[in-house]
Amino acid sequence: MKKLAFSLLALSCLGASTQAPAQPEFEQVEKGRYLAAIGDCAACHTADPQKPFAGGVVIKTPFGTLVGANITPDIATGIGKWRYSDFKRAMSEGIGHNGKRLYGAMPFTAYTKVTDEDNRAIWAYLQTLTPVRQWVETNQLPFPFNIRASLIVWNWLNADKGEYQPDLSKSAEWNRGAYIVQGLGHCGTCHTPKNILGGDKNERFLQGAEVENWWAPNITGANHDGLGRWSIQDIKDYLRDGINRYDSASGPMAEEVKNASQHWKDADLQAVAVYLKSLKNNEKQPPTALKPDNPQMVTGKAIYFDRCSACHTSTGKGEKNIFPQLANSALINAQQPVSLMRVVLAGSRGADTPTHPTAPAMPSFAATMNDRQIADVLTYIRNSWGNAASAVSASDIQKMREKLKE
């Protein structure tokens, strides 16, 4: 920013208009604001809406707790002492100011694909934020995971540095979608299964993973448990409105819609949808649905018609843009019923957006249904109306109850 100010002063002394070079700066900042929304930076860096980007968001990992850093330009507790080169290195290599190595919860393994031009725009935007004096202890991991030197090995095993390289055999629209999904959108951070060290299993890119007791579903073009049945418009509706004819966003995805994707430009929503639909990944043969006379199916059907059919209908069709469709549902067919168990036990509320200001809600059944009843009704739902998925056991429900108490 100092260099820019010096340049403007020099032009003024030469008799040039100061208004001409000011416009590109404004455009760069606004571009950075938009890119920060694509990256959903607020999800990890804004705990208090009154203190945007001042950090404090608790991030639960299999290895312990991390906390989102203060990235306002405060000199003492934020990034006020950083230079652009520090920011670029953090984004591209996971190494911050003074060589401090960052944990993979800061998705630099995806951000490394971001172009220098886009990084400069984000940096320009961050410099305009109000500095907030708020100290954040980001590393709350137990020994030995709190030793940052171990990240040298982690990076070597799990991080591939380099900007996104366009696939010249694909359209510009497809490449834009790939750039967002693989880069700033960092979709793989939640939707790609992880190895024992917490790195991405890239051979199963976007094929579903468990995140903080939610299931981030398969978002490839797979027909059974992915987005194969969704149209381009369905994907756009979901990302913009938080709901479509098949599903409504809940949990972390509802936050993503509210904080980020509802603000994306239509062209970017289109590009992302086109890219996701193109990912097939050698879809596996779906399992065979349980037979109607299976004991769990019989009991589950009775529970469904007593507790669930009023909203989701007797045929599992739901109510368009109000109550999600359960029939032929990718989320219902998910490899793991994690989100289903959580939503039934704890309830859920979708994202409120300008087009759907009243977010649809699901009540909690933890106190009115026992583990066996919930297991049976979920098993019935996962094997009815075109769905086919593994049965849910009472012990699965009991384990989820315990997790939700933590």
Image (cartoon, grey):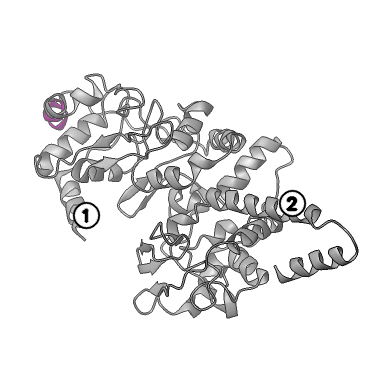
Disc nearer the start of the sequence (1/2): 2
When asked about the image quadrant of residue 375, the answer is top left
Q: Nearer the viewer, residue 323 or 197?
A: 323
Q: Residue at x 33, y 55 (%)?
A: 212
Residue in the image at 53% along x and 72% along y? 74
In the image, residue 355 sits, relative to residue 346, either above or below, namely: above
- Residue 149 shows in the view: yes
Residue located farthest toward the top when viewing the structure as drawn: 315
Is the residue marked by circle 2 packed among few (<14), some (14-19), or many (20+) residues within 10 Å? few
Mark 2 secondary-structure assignment: helix
Task: Work out which residue is located at the far right of the displayed protein and give it.
Answer: 14
The disc placed on residue 404 is: 1
Q: How many marks?
A: 2
Kind of residue at disc 2: Gln
Local crowd size for mark 1, using a 10 Å CA cut-off: few (<14), some (14–19), many (≥20) = few
Q: Dot 2 corresponds to which residue? A: 23
Judge from the rendering whether residue 50 lies leftward or rightward of residue 261; answer left or right: left
- 404 relative to 353, above or below: below
Q: Nearer the viewer, residue 246 or 327?
A: 246
Disc 1 and disc 2 in contact, CB within 8 angstroms: no
Q: Which quarter of the figure has residue 264?
A: top right
CA gap, disc 1 and disc 2: 50 Å
Residue 233: say if magenta: no
Secondary structure mostly seen in the magenta stretch: helix
Q: Is residue 60 left or right of residue 119?
A: left
Picture coordinates of residue 308, whole percent (x, y): 18, 28
| Figure quadrant of residue 61 | bottom left
Image location (x, y in percent) of residue 164: 67, 52
Q: Which residues are magenta?
A: 294-301
Amino acid found under the numbered disc labelled 1: Leu
Task: Look at 40% across and 77% down and name the residue there.
Answer: 146
